Image: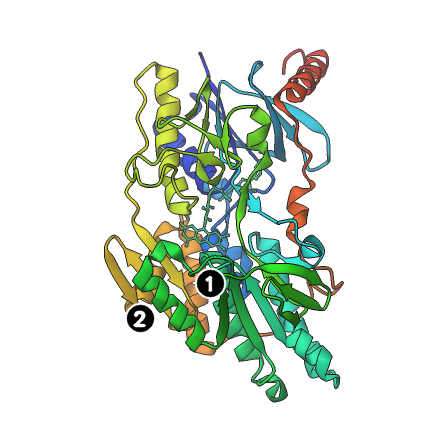
Amino acid sequence: MSRPRIVVVGAGFGGVHTLRHLERRIPTGAADIALVAPHDYMLYSPLLPQVASGLLTPQSVAMSVHRLTRDTRLIPGHAVGVDTADRTVVVRRPTGELAPVPYDRLVLAPGGLTRGFDIPGLTEHAYGAKTLAEAVLLRDHVLAQLELANDSRDPVEREERCRFIVVGGGYTGVETAASLMRLTEEAARRYPELRSVIRWHLVDIAPKVLPELGDRLGRRALDMLRSMGIEVKLKVSVREVTADKVVLTDGRALPCRTLIWTAGVAPSPLMETLGKPTQRGRLEVDSDLRVPGLPEVFAVGDAAAVPNLSHPESPYCPPTAQYASRQAATAAENVCSSILGRPMREFRHRDMGLVVDLSGKDALARVLQFELTGLPALAVTRGYHVAAVPSAPARARIMANWAIRAATGGEVSRLGFADDGRPASFVANEDVHYLDTESAGREGARLRENLRERYGED
Ligand SMILES: Cc1cc2nc3c(=O)[nH]c(=O)nc-3n(C[C@H](O)[C@H](O)[C@H](O)COP(=O)(O)OP(=O)(O)OC[C@H]3O[C@@H](n4cnc5c(N)ncnc54)[C@H](O)[C@@H]3O)c2cc1C
């Protein structure tokens, strides 16, 4: 292979870290490295709740791929299918056209989408908290509810607008509820009449929140949320959502215009299109991160079911940034080894723990076997994020935002993104039309033939 074509799908933790490790290992120009991604930035999603609360600006968590990589070609669009026989990825560009991208090695890292369930009204009325646009819209929507409630004399409308329900007791739900609750607390200083009306609820079908923290710290998290004034309801889910009401599975009907859905992530539908075995939508890979039967295709991150060799008690690695980034290093090494005919390395990683920022001065951290709360946990949490952000300018922006907030307090004005009243629903995530591997083969062959006719090569 004179100049191998390496294609990476997805500009998240798995994809961008794979590219950075590849670039470190491969001399400049020795391979054609391409990234297929809908946006030209890597989102540092663990800090999204701080964007939703206005503590961080959206730019500080969106790191330019052009800065993070030096020898990578960006192909804008969604990978919608893979012709594994002809080694071609079919990409839907932002213009809607399809384009073929041939590869010698492929790394799939498209992450996941917010998973909706078959709950009446959920997709029409719920808000997601997984993308940058959703975080920005959510903040505007929450502030708009307070403004409108303050301007209304109708006690029913006030109650609906001042009740906020977050579904999901994992780190996304807990951090989103805590940080937005602080935002409404801060905004309510302007609306004294609303202070006694504002209500935050966190519901989860599971019997505990943050199970990843372990029993003792999980119970501490529950106590902290409750002492902040968040009503936590466990073993309960949502039965129905309307524009002004949420019905829970315990029969309670709560007047409410803001349901934030964080209960679960579904792997990208791209993984099912390959026609290979999946685990609840995650593409199964061997311990060297290759897809069984497809030695030139690798998969990492939330969309891959990677054997968890260091923790045999749980068969697959958890879908976290910590694992996606480490898998990326192994994937890059194995891509190079497979080109050079060297032996593959198995992926092994010991879980380092979890950090949870409850906003204000409250945080929880489990670092290896150590459990921390309060200021020490906050220091570890912030330190961890600063170290994990892969770009120096982004790191500087994040720390500057924290410092400005500490010195001057928060800004609670609305930016106008939610003015049309449309929920920032996560259904938009599913607009992409995916192709199974046979259809991808037909489309790929047709598109490559068109390119050969026009340019003499593809
Ligand atoms: C609010 C929140 C808080 C979190 N907090 C933590 C935390 O504290 N610690 C932790 O370890 N993890 C945390 N996570 C989880 C962590 O963000 C994910 O595990 C991690 O992002 C997974 O990395 P990934 O590369 O698989 O996917 P992602 O980082 O989601 O990246 C996927 C990329 O692929 C792109 N893409 C999607 N479909 C396609 C397609 N068809 N073609 C091309 N590109 C595509 C997406 O646009 C995106 O750029 C959090 C997640 C959220 C949402």
Q: Residue, x 69% and y 37% (percent of image)?
A: 94
Give how far across and how far down residue 351 sits, in percent: 30, 46
Quadrant assignment for the N terminus: top left
At label 2, the amino acid type is Leu
Give the left or right position of residue 27, taking residue 33 as reference: left
Looking at the image, what colour scheme do you see? rainbow
Q: Residue, x 65% and y 58% (percent of image)?
A: 126
Q: Is mark 2 within 8 Å of ligand 1?
A: no
Of 389 and 226, nearer the camera is: 226
Cα distance between the residues tagged 1 and 2: 16 Å
At label 1, the amino acid type is Glu
Give the left or right position of residue 340, taking residue 35 as reference: left
Give the left or right position of residue 408, taking residue 242 as reference: left
Mark 1 secondary-structure assignment: helix
Q: Residue, x 57% and y 79% (percent of image)?
A: 187
Can you say whether 164 is above or below 339 in the image?
below
Quadrant of res 319: top left
Can you say whether 43 is above or below 283 in the image?
below
Q: Residue furthest left?
A: 369
Can you say whether 254 is above or below 2 in the image?
below
Give how far across and how far down residue 457 sits, in percent: 63, 13
Give how far across and how far down residue 347 sits, in percent: 32, 32
* Mark 2 lies on residue: 375
Q: Neighbour class for label 1 at 10 Å: few (<14), some, many (≥20)?
A: many
Q: Is mark 1 within 8 Å of ligand 1?
A: yes
Mark 2 secondary-structure assignment: helix
Quadrant assignment for the C terminus: top right
* Mark 1 lies on residue: 175
Q: Which is closer to the viewer, label 1 or label 2? A: 1
Does residue 411 show up?
no
Does residue 279 show up?
yes
